[in-house]
């Protein structure tokens, strides 16, 4: 019943050279990493996932982190090899690696390509050295542009990230920086993030004590509008809140999240959303008609994740892949229709094209009439934060930076 249903695969590599002061991702600094153990653990999880979802068509693969460009290319090659052996991996399937642009990592791009990577997403973040230093980055602006140049030579598709609303950032400086970046962006995709102060980060401590300031909301909104206008002019309009692309160059993997398709998360802290068509243990016609959507989340701590995947007691796994009882895919949370409805709204509204309420209704069985605040929708339309065109609700450029407030207002 699940033949031909797409499945996106995410692999999380949790290590970085150091912790950037603004970062709240699941990233860690380790004195040493046993790459062989990591290879084994990823491969065991792939086997377990295949055991549960053998008939899927792999639609994209994404290596994120952390800094996955610190992985050994051999690890990537074994993972892509396993995927190809178990499900098949067509040449046209997007296989992305997030990379930091130090010269050491850029020198590995050719090996990553040979290992099956066909798209890189490079964390450039800023185009001047003082700001890169303030962001805790290990590369210089020149190194970053050299890494982008290597990516351009090797990969048909690539993207790079910049961060704006940095401390002391002005609209004029950002416009000049963005325009200087554009000639390097002929991969057709850029991710442009607004710097935000995240709980538990070094920047939060500095911000709370008044030693760090960043542009406040009104000015940040002007940065957002400026970014959108420059990118629109350049033929790479926003297709999501922070992502800009030429038509056809959108990240297929990230679209799987935003369109609420199935994706599996492998590695510490990785999330997944998976649908059992027919239910996990369908025995009869009624059960077979049911769709059960589950949420998975792997243990966040790298060492514990490795241990739970690899240290399987003898005799506990008869008839199943060796890691099965300890896998992230065991004991998932079952998502109720209402939870799915809310997630589809949250993810779909990130996209510029918006979310089709009829599709949400058909998918979840939840009638939007009963679970959306229609007075709030009308007010937000009147104030220019969202538009409603038939059954499609979409954020405007004004609404994009305040998605969370819009969601709070419209979800009952
Ligand atoms: S390199 Fe990326 S994941 Fe690692 S600490 Fe810096 S921002 Fe976070």
Image (cartoon, rainbow, N blue to C red):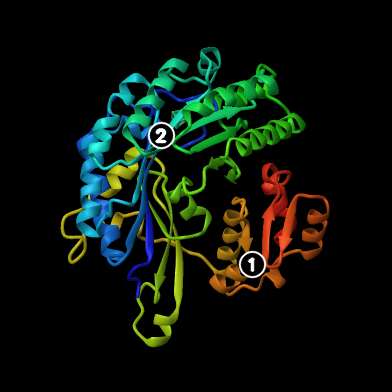
Q: Nearer the viewer, residue 50 or 157?
A: 157
Callout 2: helix, strand or loop? loop
Q: Which of 188 and 210 is in front in this view?
A: 188
Q: Tag 1: Cα neighbours inside 10 Å, few (<14), some, or many (≥20)?
A: many
Seen in the image, is 346 located left or right of residue 314? right
Tell me the residue at 35%/35% (across/down): 68
Seen in the image, is 360 located left or right of residue 159? right
How far from the left and from the top, in percent, is residue 129? 51, 13
Q: How far apart are marks 2 and 1 (CA)?
A: 35 Å
Tell me the residue at 83%/54% (across/down): 382
- Marker disc for residue 66: 2
How far from the left and from the top, in percent, is residue 359? 58, 69
Callout 1: helix, strand or loop? helix
Where does label 1 land, which residue? 357
Tell me the residue at 27%/35% (across/down): 112
Q: Tag 2: Cα neighbours inside 10 Å, few (<14), some, or many (≥20)?
A: many
**The residue carrying mark 2 has its beta carbon less than 8 Å from ligand 1:** yes
**Residue 60 visible in rendering:** yes
How far from the left and from the top, in percent, is residue 406? 72, 51
**As drawn, 302 above or below 86:** above
**The residue carrying mark 1 has its beta carbon less than 8 Å from ligand 1:** no
Quadrant, the C terminus? bottom right
Q: Nearer the viewer, residue 156 or 132?
A: 156
Residue 326 lies in what quarter of the image? bottom left
Residue at the farthest bottom position: 285
The residue mark sitting in front, 2 or 1, is 1
Q: Quadrant of ligand 1?
A: top left
**As drawn, 85 above or below 288:** above
- Marker disc for residue 17: none
**As drawn, 386 above or below 288:** above
Q: Earlier in the sequence, mark 2 or mark 1?
A: 2
**Residue 310 visible in rendering:** no
């Amino acid at each position: 019943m699940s033949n031909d249903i797409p499945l996106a695969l995410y692999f999380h590599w949790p290590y970085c050279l150091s912790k950037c002061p603004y970062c709240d991702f699941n990233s860690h600094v380790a004195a040493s990493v046993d790459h062989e153990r990591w290879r084994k653990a990823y491969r065991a999880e792939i086997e377990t996932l295949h055991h549960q979802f053998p008939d899927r068509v792999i639609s994209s693969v994404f290596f994120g982190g952390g800094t996955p460009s610190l992985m050994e290319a051999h690890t990537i090659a074994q993972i892509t090899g396993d995927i190809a052996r178990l499900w098949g991996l067509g040449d046209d399937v997007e296989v992305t690696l997030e990379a930091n642009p130090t010269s050491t990592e850029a020198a590995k791009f050719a090996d990553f390509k040979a290992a099956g990577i066909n798209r890189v997403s490079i964390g450039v973040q800023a185009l001047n050295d003082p700001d890169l230093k303030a962001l805790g980055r290990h590369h210089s602006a020149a190194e970053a542009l050299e890494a982008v140049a290597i990516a351009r030579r090797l990969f048909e598709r690539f993207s790079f990230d910049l961060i704006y609303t940095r401390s002391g950032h002005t609209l004029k400086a950002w416009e000049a920086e963005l325009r200087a970046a554009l000639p390097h962006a002929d991969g057709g995709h850029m991710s442009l993030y607004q710097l935000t102060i995240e709980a538990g980060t070094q920047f939060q401590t500095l911000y709370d004590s008044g030693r760090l300031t960043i542009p406040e909301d009104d000015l940040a909104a002007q940065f957002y509008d400026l970014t959108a206008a420059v990118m629109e002019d350049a033929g790479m309009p926003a297709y999501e809140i922070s992502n800009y692309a030429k038509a056809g160059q959108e990240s297929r993997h990230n679209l799987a999240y935003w369109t609420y398709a199935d994706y599996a998360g492998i590695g510490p802290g990785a999330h997944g959303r998976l649908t059992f068509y027919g239910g996990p243990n369908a025995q009869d016609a009624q059960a077979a008609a049911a769709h059960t959507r589950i949420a998975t989340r792997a243990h966040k701590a790298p060492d514990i994740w490795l241990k739970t995947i690899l240290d399987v007691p003898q005799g506990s796994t008869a008839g199943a892949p060796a890691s099965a009882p300890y896998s992230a895919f065991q004991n998932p949370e079952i998502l109720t229709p209402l939870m799915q409805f809310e997630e589809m709204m949250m993810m779909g509204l990130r996209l510029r094209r918006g979310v089709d309420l009829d599709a949400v209704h058909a998918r979840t069985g939840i009638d939007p009439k009963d679970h959306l605040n229609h007075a709030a929708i009308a007010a937000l339309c009147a104030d220019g934060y969202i538009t409603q065109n038939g059954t499609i609700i979409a954020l405007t450029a004004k609404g994009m930076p305040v998605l969370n407030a819009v969601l709070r207002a419209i979800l009952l």
